Amino acid sequence: MSNWVKVAPFNEIPKLGARVVRTKTTDIGVFRTEDDRIFAVNNSCPHKGGPLSQGIVYGDKVACPLHSWKISLVDGKAEEPDVGQTACFNTKVEEGIVYLELKE
């Protein structure tokens, strides 16, 4: 079963920026790219747990603020030569509002 939760109005997530959604079990970073795509990944870098929402967004990646690991916003995988992955979440935009799908 899935549950779509409201994150924020689309225009309140800055280009190349992020918002954090806190759930009972994890923090999720919701990112907006330069070309206005919305992605969501676990807010914890697979390397040392750095807060990805505080990293630099470029293209469809985010650079972790701790050690500059580059994490794909599309599939959550670390860019080579680094190895690791973080969870991804579905998003949608309806009537100017960003939603995040949480699995139960």
Image (spheres, rainbow, N blue to C red):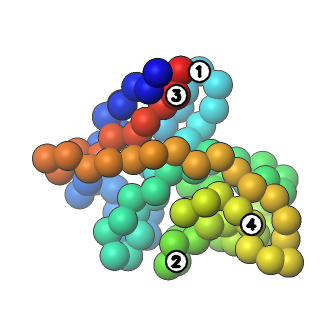
Q: Which of marks 2 and 4 is nearer the N terminus?
A: 2
User: Could you tell me how far apart the alpha carbons at marks 1 and 3 are, in whole angstroms?
Assistant: 12 Å
Q: Which of marks 1 and 4 is nearer the N terminus?
A: 1
Q: Is residue 1 above or below residue 47?
A: above
User: Could you tell me how far apart the alpha carbons at marks 2 and 4 are, in whole angstroms?
Assistant: 14 Å
Q: Name the residue under label 2.
A: 58
Q: Name the residue under label 4.
A: 78
Q: Is residue 72 above or below residue 96?
A: below
Q: Can residue 50 be seen in this view?
A: no
Position of residue 77 measured from the top left corner of the image (x, y, whole percent) = 70, 62
Q: Which of marks 1 and 3 is nearer the N terminus?
A: 1
Q: Which of marks 1 and 2 is nearer the N terminus?
A: 1
Which numbered marker is on residue 103? Answer: 3
- Judge from the rendering whether residue 69 lies leftward or rightward of residue 93; answer left or right: right
Q: What element carries label 3?
A: strand
Position of residue 62 measured from the top left corner of the image (x, y, whole percent) = 60, 68
Q: What element carries label 1?
A: loop
Q: Mark 1 points at which residue?
A: 24
Q: In this view, does 40 lie above or below 17?
A: above
Q: Is mark 2 on a helix, strand or loop?
A: strand
User: Could you tell me how far apart the alpha carbons at marks 1 and 2 are, in whole angstroms?
Assistant: 29 Å
In the image, what residue type sits under mark 1?
Answer: Lys
Q: Which circle, 1 or 3, is nearer the viewer?
A: 3
In the image, what residue type sits under mark 3?
Answer: Lys
